[in-house]
């Protein structure tokens, strides 16, 4: 069974085999990935994945309403917790992004509707054969980043947006030789 080459250990392998690239449409799950992809900026995804459970605990299961209401004191307590990435800008961005998400939900009906509008509601199905072909950004991620920044989201640069799109199945970037490429394409 061939996997994408980045799935190098049990944690990454399980994530690759069960989550990465699977189309997500639940607002809470999309918000979680938005926060985690922002936290990952400059670090490895494995680092974030290893800390995901603690993030879920500290950020109320990524309940958008509850995160939007987090106090500075709560965020400062989270910042002191070694179970997450302790970067003030990234931790405070979770609350800012929750507030931006609530505005988007009010305007578009759901975070799902807003985010998936960038791909017209259908996953982009790429056919990369080699890891080196997979881009870090695209014109689509550039457009998403610019629009999200206008909505008040933080830590949503083009690279983060593209990684978010990959993770949430808006883009199928499993290599064609990977067993998940076909499974996700056919699901």
Image (tube, rainbow, N blue to C red):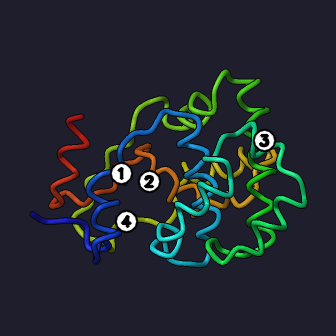
Give coordinates of residue 132: x percent, y percent: 33, 74
Left or right: where does residue 166 sit relative to residue 27?
left
Secondary structure under tag 1 reads: loop
From the image, tell me which residue sits under label 3: 100
Q: Quadrant of residue 65?
A: top right
From the image, tell me which residue sits under label 1: 19
Mark nearer the N terminus (1 vs 3):
1
Q: CA separation, marks 1 and 2?
A: 7 Å
Looking at the image, residue 83 lies above or below residue 66: below
Secondary structure under tag 2 reads: helix
Secondary structure under tag 4 reads: loop
Left or right: where does residue 73 sit relative to residue 34?
right
Residue 134's label in the rendered image is 4
| Disc 1 versus disc 3: nearer the observer | 1
In the rendered image, which quarter contains the N terminus?
bottom left
Q: CA separation, marks 4 and 2?
A: 14 Å
Please tell me which residue is depicted at 71% across the width and 61% down the height of the picture: 155
| Disc 4 versus disc 2: nearer the observer | 2
The reply to whether residue 144 is visible in this rendering is: yes
| Disc 1 versus disc 2: nearer the observer | 1
From the image, tell me which residue sits under label 2: 167
Please tell me which residue is depicted at 19% across the width and 44% down the height of the picture: 183
Q: CA separation, marks 3 and 2?
A: 21 Å
């Amino acid at each position: 069974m061939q996997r994408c080459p980045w799935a190098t250990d049990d944690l990454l392998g399980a994530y690759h085999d069960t989550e990465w690239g699977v189309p997500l449409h639940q607002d809470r799950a999309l918000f979680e990935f938005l926060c985690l992809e922002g936290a990952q900026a400059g670090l490895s995804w494995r680092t974030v994945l290893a800390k995901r459970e603690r993030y879920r605990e500290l950020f109320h299961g990524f309940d958008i309403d509850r995160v939007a209401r987090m106090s500075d004191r709560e965020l400062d307590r989270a910042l002191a917790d070694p179970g997450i990435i302790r970067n003030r800008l990234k931790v405070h961005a979770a609350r800012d992004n929750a507030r931006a998400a609530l505005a988007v939900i009010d305007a578009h009906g759901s975070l799902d509707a807003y985010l998936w509008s960038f791909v017209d509601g259908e996953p982009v199905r790429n056919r990369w054969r080699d890891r080196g072909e997979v881009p870090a950004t695209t014109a689509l991620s550039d457009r998403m980043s610019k629009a999200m920044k206008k909505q008040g989201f933080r830590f949503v640069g083009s690279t983060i947006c593209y990684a978010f799109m990959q993770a949430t199945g808006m883009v199928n970037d499993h290599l064609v030789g990977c067993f998940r490429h076909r499974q996700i394409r056919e699901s």
